[in-house]
Amino acid sequence: MCKHYESNTTYMQDRKELNGFIKEVFGALRKHGVRKVTKKLRELTIDAYSDEKQKIIDFIIFKIYEAYGVTAKELKTSTKRGTVTEARQMGYLLFKKYFNISQTEIAIYFGRNGNMVVSKFFQKFKVMDRKIKRERDFLDTYDTIITHVDNFKKEMIVKYATENNYGT
């Protein structure tokens, strides 16, 4: 028996559940392949956010919609170029800033097949120049959305503090 368990019965139950889980994962790997299973497991990491983080995600997606007219579904599934791509790139930056998740996790959230697209965009972002109109417009939109998200987060903190009688 493992020293972390109070009884041998609990240990055996956990071990049985773990073995069952491993068998299910192995079956899924055989049926769907490593890439698909890994992608789904990584999606679970992103989807497991707290309610507060989910509210921020929803707010970011809403602000991207306001700025670009691109829906959440389009951000995740569309293969269109132009405005949809630019909106998705805005999402990459905002998710990295506010959630500090890996480029792979960002790519998965936005329906991309790997982190190369995200990585290339982050490299491009580092050298954007406000003297170039298109890049200036993108950076201005980024700054505006950051201001809105920061204010939204502050409002959430104040609301939480008020609801829980902090500071009184």
Image: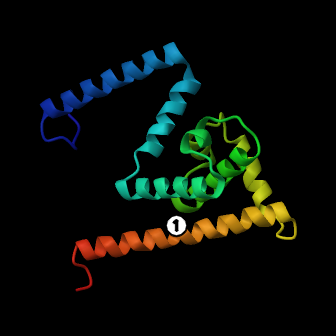
The residue at 57%/72% (across/down) is: 147
- Which residue, given by chain and number where applicable, does mark 1 sit on? 149
> Which quadrant is the C terminus positioned in?
bottom left
Q: Is residue 127 visible?
A: no
Query: Badge 1: few (under 14), some or many (20 or more) residues near its Cα, within 10 Å?
Result: some
The residue at 38%/69% (across/down) is: 156
In this rendering, the answer to whether 127 lies above or below 1 is below
Location of residue 143 in the rendering, given as x and y in whole percent from the top left corner: 65, 69
Location of residue 100 in the rendering, given as x and y in whole percent from the top left corner: 55, 57
In this rendering, the answer to whether 52 lies above or below 77 is below
- In depth, the one of 157 and 101 nearer the eye is 157
Asked whether, in this view, residue 123 is left or right of residue 16, the answer is right
Location of residue 28 in the rendering, given as x and y in whole percent from the top left corner: 46, 18
Choose top left, top right, bottom left or bottom right for residue 146: bottom right
- In depth, the one of 122 and 15 nearer the eye is 122
Location of residue 137 in the rendering, given as x and y in whole percent from the top left corner: 76, 64
Choose top left, top right, bottom left or bottom right for residue 80: top right
Q: Is residue 6 visible?
A: yes
Which structural element holds mark 1? helix
The residue type indicated by label 1 comes to Val
> Which quadrant is the N terminus positioned in?
top left
Choose top left, top right, bottom left or bottom right for residue 19: top left
Toward the bottom, the furthest residue is: 168
Asked whether, in this view, residue 6 is left or right of residue 33, the answer is left
